[in-house]
Amino acid sequence: MTSRSFSFLCTVFALLFLRVFAADYHEHLDLQPLPPSSLLASFNFRSNASLTSFENQDFRYFPRSLGQILQHANTKELHLRFTTGRWDAESWGERPWHGFKEGGTGVELWAWIEAETDELAFAKWVTLNQYLSGLFCASLNFVDSTRTTRPVVTFEPMGNHSTSTKPLHLLHGTLPGEVVCTENLTPFLKLLPCKGKAGISSLFDGHKLFDAAWQSMSIDVRPICPEDANECQVEIEQTVDMVLDIERSKRPRDNPIPRPVAADQLVCDQSKDYNDDETCYPIDHASDKGWRLSEVFGHTISGACPLTNRDDDKLICLRVPKDREALTTAGAYESPAPDGLSRCFSIIENFPFDLVLPPQQTHTGVPLQQPILYAERTIIGHGQERGGMRSILTNPSTTNSVDFIYFETLPWFMRPYVHTLRAKVTNNTSGQTIDVLSSHIVKDIFYRPAVDRRRGTQLELILSVPAASTVTLVYEFEKAILRYTEYPPDANRGFNVAPAVIRLLDNNNNMDPIGRKAAPVYLRTTSLLLPLPTPDFSMPYNVIILTSTVMALAFGSIFNILVRRFVGVEEAPPNAIKSKIVGRFVAIRDKLKGKAVKIE
């Protein structure tokens, strides 16, 4: 056999090998322009491993580093979130993936751990957090007992756990003050089969990702048992969602500082009464402006990942009207959707892919799906001792009420008074406000009080908001006084309070964009800053100085009174005073000369 024939056979076997095993890895990218000048990019990566191979540590597409951690910590299902920014629901509509892939600001983690007792489950939970902290370069090792809760009804397992032999324990932890940055993105990319070198993951750039107005990275691991498979599998799904400002992202790296638009380039609203040559109300025509994929992300896609399933011919989908022109590089195949609101593209290996939307005047747009519920939460009250929490929940529907679960995790130094819970219902149409009993709105309460320096407060409410109404929930809390060693270096900034988690009920018909098992609809409010009574940390220094001075004066005075003997002049010997004075001068003279002298 010649060397050319041998190399040809090796190439054929390699292609057959990739063809056989590539069915376990899938990736997908959704692009959707958002008003006024934003672009939503949703990256999804999914791979499977048989349960037998996973237990035998025979990893192929499942990352070995994460798989060994889950096995060592007896974790059967894992959900990890890294999120920064705030989702603008009023302008951008419903959250991607129905909010299931979104986490609270900072880091959020919940997992199902197999253990016989609660104590063993918490020990495995601590081990899991420490290992994930090292793997993702995050501060997950700070998720201790004070930041850990055990939700009752908010979360449900998304995998098939019928094969579990021991009880499963759900534990949930948050770090609202964690800053998500590039050092968390690099370990995320290393978990992917192509590791950001090919496929849609080659678009990832830390400068672009963390410059977004909102971004979320999620990792979900769960066991699944498909009906058409012979055995159960372990699925890992990684998702990155970001909302990029198009004009901000298109700035070149050599000129990153934004500058105001020149006066001759402003497009003014002529309908304004105050419009003239010196006054202009600018109009944003960002929806008509064009953009290029390589401009927004900094570079093109470096061809398709060779491990991707060959049947996935719709790797990239663009959600724009059918009358909007879209141009691609050569070698890409376009397949429009039947609804005329999106189109998908397939790419080939070892060939760069770029997408261009030229400037075009359009009269139609893609309708945004509106959220089922709007939620916001703020801290009210004044003073350093007491405060209040106010949650505003708005139902935009005019026909249907909304049932949901409201979950809050409060630090131990926030002591809520559940008996002060009050509800107020406001009609969105008439503006009429009615004070009602909380039992009419709150269907059920799951409450676990805090223990100082051991665990936080866990509050779960099952609520119902009538149609076209806004419910305002208010309750009071008390602020605890901390020890001076428990204050952080930036104590005057305030203490982070984790966002509230809202899970909508009766929405089992929702399907994710890739047509898999329906996931619950989630919402998360923004995190809060709680001001606590903060001492003046310069006072310890002042106290030490003052105490030392008082002690020196008191000790010196008392010592003189106890040791010295006072006598009258007439009682002293005639030459005693003179001899003592002379002795003092002699002692001073000898000391100056370096002699050791004992003064009597």
Image (cartoon, helix red, strand yellow):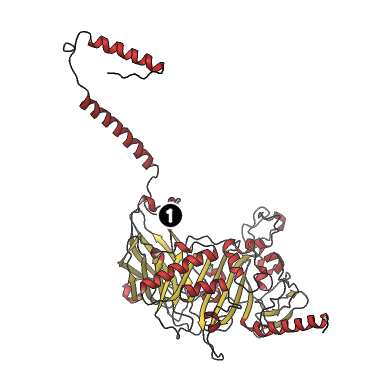
Q: Mark 1: which amino acid?
A: Gly
Q: Residue at x 60, y 67 (%)?
A: 243
User: Relative to 51, is 17 on the left or the right?
Assistant: right
Residue 344 in percent (x, y) is at: 68, 80
Out of 119 and 476, give the one closest to the viewer.
119
Residue 485 lies, in percent from the top left, at 38, 51
**Can residue 131 be seen at all in this image of the molecule?**
yes
Mark 1: give few (<14), some (14-19) or many (20+) Cα within 10 Å: some
**Residue 587 is drawn in which quadrant?**
top left
Q: Nearer the viewer, residue 230 or 111?
A: 230
At x 54%, y 65%, the residue is 136
Residue corresponding to mark 1 = 494
| x then y, percent, for residue 450 | 33, 65
Note whether 2 is above or below 185 in the view shown: below
In the visual, does 244 lie left or right of 479? right
- Considering the image in quadrants, where does the N terminus appear? bottom right
